[in-house]
Image (cartoon, rainbow, N blue to C red):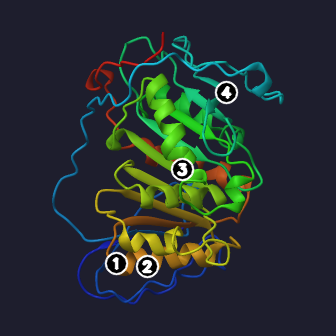
Amino acid sequence: MVLFLLIAGCGSLEIPLMPTVAASAAAPNFPSSGVWRLAPATYTAAAAPVWAVTAGIATSEPTVKPTPTLRITHTPSPVPVVPVQYRPRDAGAPFVDSPPESVPCDGQGFFFRSRFPSGVGGSWREYHAYLPPCYGHDGRVYPVVYLIHGSVQNDSHWLDLGLARVADDGIANGQYPPFIAIMPNSGQLGNVSSGGDNSIEGITVDYLMPFVDNYYCTWNDKPGRSIGGISRGGYWALEIAFRNFDLFSSVSGHSSHLRYETDTAKYNPLATYATADLSNMRIWLDRGETDFLRVGQEQLHESLSEALIRHEYLINPGGHSDTYWATYLKDYIDWHTEEWPRERDAYPSCRTHIG
């Protein structure tokens, strides 16, 4: 497998096609911006992308990992308990009425279903969550990643792909810090709206995130908050992050559904990147080389490149399917967690409003 990593530099470059495991892979259409430098990179054969791009302006400044700080922005209130009539009926992950206060230290995180109150899209909305082993034992906060499912899936999608196993293994071997994953259900609203207050954006920013920061031990500040999504969920992750760039440190879009035919420029990441301050946001884009939605993803990559907005763009063997996303799931979680401190004593004390 041959891989090229493109990072910003000086001088223009004509990129020749090189052999890959998937011989039909086409080279991405890189813009002639005069800011590219070519360097080889090494990946394991199982996860080697056909093409990998890091775009932006090169800098010699060292990367400084953020130090967690605690912000209390809400007045303590009783923990909302989901009324019986609003509890989901489907089997699978256990349903809990209210956020757990702790998780046993047995090497396994706790994943579950619950609901949160909302003023948009129904009075209670469903979500799945993952809490790491030993959650709540040391009295400190945890970084949070919000993960959004595809158009025909639901809030169990990321867990179905293997999130809990990947998280447990990474935390156990010290590769990941303990973290919280919140996976909301978009429902039909995720497919018929494009952005704004009465959409998945409004639900996430105005209801879900305040709820999570109030009732879980979260590092409730931009450096401790990340968001990602698959397919239609990739659209929503990018839409939310680009329009609320002060809330998230990182955003990832995996096989993202990006089309002007379905989403107006007012909300579409294909347009909103131009007015967003993305200078302090990490951005990851990836797709399978045969992804039927690749045109929009390629367009966003080219637009970000022309604007000199740093981002990562990977084209891997595969298409637009659960098989593809499950194959690269660990890569996604590796990326989301890599900037967070590993040592628990680096995190401040938790002050939730439980009780």
Residue 309, percent from left and from top: 34, 70
Left or right? Give the position of 112 relative to 146: right
Q: Is residue 80 above or below residue 126?
A: above
Q: Is residue 281 visible?
A: yes
Quote the CA–CA distance across marks 1 and 2: 6 Å
Residue placed under numbered mark 4 in the picture: 114
Eyeballing the image, is 31 above or below 210? Answer: below
State which quadrant residue 167 falls in: top right
Alpha-carbon distance for marks 3 and 4? Answer: 19 Å
Dot 2 falls on a residue whose secondary structure is helix
The residue tagged 1 is 307
Vertical relation: 343 (above or below) 231 = above
N-terminal-most mark, 2 or 3: 3
Query: Mark 2 to mark 3: distance in Å?
Result: 26 Å
- Pointer 2 or 4: first along the chain: 4
Q: Which residue is mark 3?
A: 202
Circle nearer the N terminus (1, 4): 4
Instruction: Please name which of the two marks, 3 or 4, marks the residue nearer to the observer.
Output: 3
In front of the other: label 1 or label 4?
4
Left or right? Give the position of 272 relative to 39: right
Q: Amino acid at mark 4?
A: Ser
Nearer the observer, 157 or 201? 201
- Mark 1 touches mark 2? (CB < 8 Å): yes
User: Which residue is pictured at 44% across the width and 45% down the height?
Assistant: 226
Pointers 2 and 4 in contact (C-beta within 8 Å): no
Gap between marks 2 and 4, in whole Å?
39 Å
Under circle 3, the secondary element is helix
Q: Which mark is residue 303?
A: 2
Q: CA distance from mark 1 to mark 4?
A: 41 Å
Give the mark toward the camera: 2 or 3: 3
Return the x and y of residue 277 as percentages of the image width and height: 32, 64
> Residue 48 falls in which quadrant of the image?
bottom right
